[in-house]
Amino acid sequence: MKFAVPALAASAALASAVPTVRSPLESRQAANVPALDDLIKAKGKVYFGTASDFYGTTAEASDAAYQKVLNNSGLFGQQTPANAMKFQPTEPNQGQFTFGPGDNFVKYAKANGQLIRCHNLIWQSQLPSYITSRQWTPADNATLTAIMKEHITNVVTHFSDACYAWDVVNEPLNGDGTYATASPFYNAIGAAYIPLAFQFASDAVKQTGKDIKLYVNEYGTENPGAKATALLNIVKDVKNRGIKIDGVGFESHFIVGQTPSRASQTSVKQQFAAAGVDVAVTELDVRFSSLPPTQAQLQQQATDYVNSVGSCLDVPRCVGVTVWDFDDKYSWIPSTFSGQGQADLFNSDLTVKPAVAAIAQLLQS
């Protein structure tokens, strides 16, 4: 999914204890930015990462200040391509693959020594017109299954040297836990499209000889309830069929003051871990429902971030945390939720919010 407050200086004690990078704003007073990836790795996790749209002609690719933060692997040890590897960008015409944006993304992240969580193979959104221009029914099962298989096989194979993990199926459920009927894959193939997608991805991974982790990724499952239960049933179904599924991504798009508690988030993650899969926080941001925020609201946002990161620390099988971009300038929130925003760790001028120091403090505790 992707589509002003003063700078906060970390405390002197925090600055002396945490590896830091220089602020990318050379005209401003230097600020200490905690190296969150280094800190979370010291807790036994694999990464603290960020999504980005850094490739080719995007605005981020020409924003030098943004790049200086993004390429600091002590801060972000993993990158997720927010859009470059989705269905429409990689196969805009049936059987014709365009990997340029994804290749550019990979080149940049690899140059920084960052892991890459590849995102995503099958989703109901950002599909090419040869899929969206028609109504799909069960009579089209074989046709769309073949399209799905060809797409997954080619994309997984092409990026096999880049991807630490893939989000194979993205957001298969509605908010109430029923299957998303806006998905052409569901309409043509039924619920079986999910294990089929994992089977095709698993077969492609085997052909590459790599150890690429395969995830299902979903929003709104961070609290116990019908949707979390439905997602857990999907995981169990795929596993019971003997098909490779390695993990579950909890997107974690939250609202300040309405974020699930650390205990609730931990409880759900533990349920999935008990089912035999890894878990990860994959798209974390915490938006304000009205702007501008007060100082008290900024502190609440910091608490919400800490509870979300803390839930990963609480679960041994939680491998890491990804924020859905780090800079409010490039956040997907304002264009999707009118009047809302400032959901990321950094303000639009790349000064840090209280949440950054709060996460660092958590990771040192």
Image (cartoon, rainbow, N blue to C red):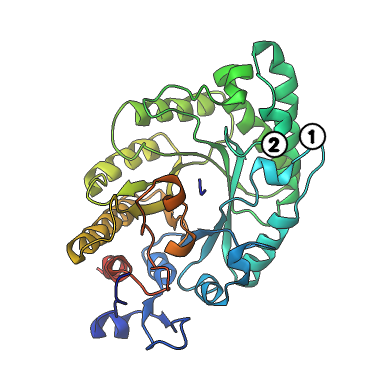
Please identify the quadrant where the C terminus is shown: bottom left
Image position of 284 (left or right of 15): right
The percent position of residue 48, horizontal first and vertical second, equals 44, 62
What kind of element bears circle 2?
A: loop
Image position of 209 (left or right of 312): right
The answer to whether the residues at label 2 and label 1 have Cβ atoms under 8 Å apart is yes
Residue denoted by label 1:
94
Image position of 327 (left or right of 105): left
N-term-proximal mark, 2 vs 1:
1
Residue 279 vs 186, above or below: the answer is below
Residue at the image position 40 percent from the left and 87 percent from the top:
28
The percent position of residue 259, horizontal first and vertical second, equals 26, 47
The answer to whether residue 131 is seen in the rendering is: yes
The percent position of residue 72, horizontal first and vertical second, equals 51, 74
Residue 139 vs 206, above or below: the answer is above
Disc 1 residue type (three-letter): Gln
Badge 2: residue crowd in 10 Å (few <14, some 14–19, many ≥20): some
Name the one closer to the observer, 318 or 258.
258
Q: Quadrant of residue 265?
A: top left
* Residue at mark 2 to residue at mark 1: CA–CA distance: 8 Å
Label drawn at residue 128? 2
Q: Nearer the viewer, mark 2 or mark 1?
A: 2
Residue at the image position 42 percent from the left and 51 percent from the top:
333
Disc 2 residue type (three-letter): Pro
The answer to whether residue 156 is seen in the rendering is: no
Residue at the image position 69 percent from the left and 29 percent from the top:
131
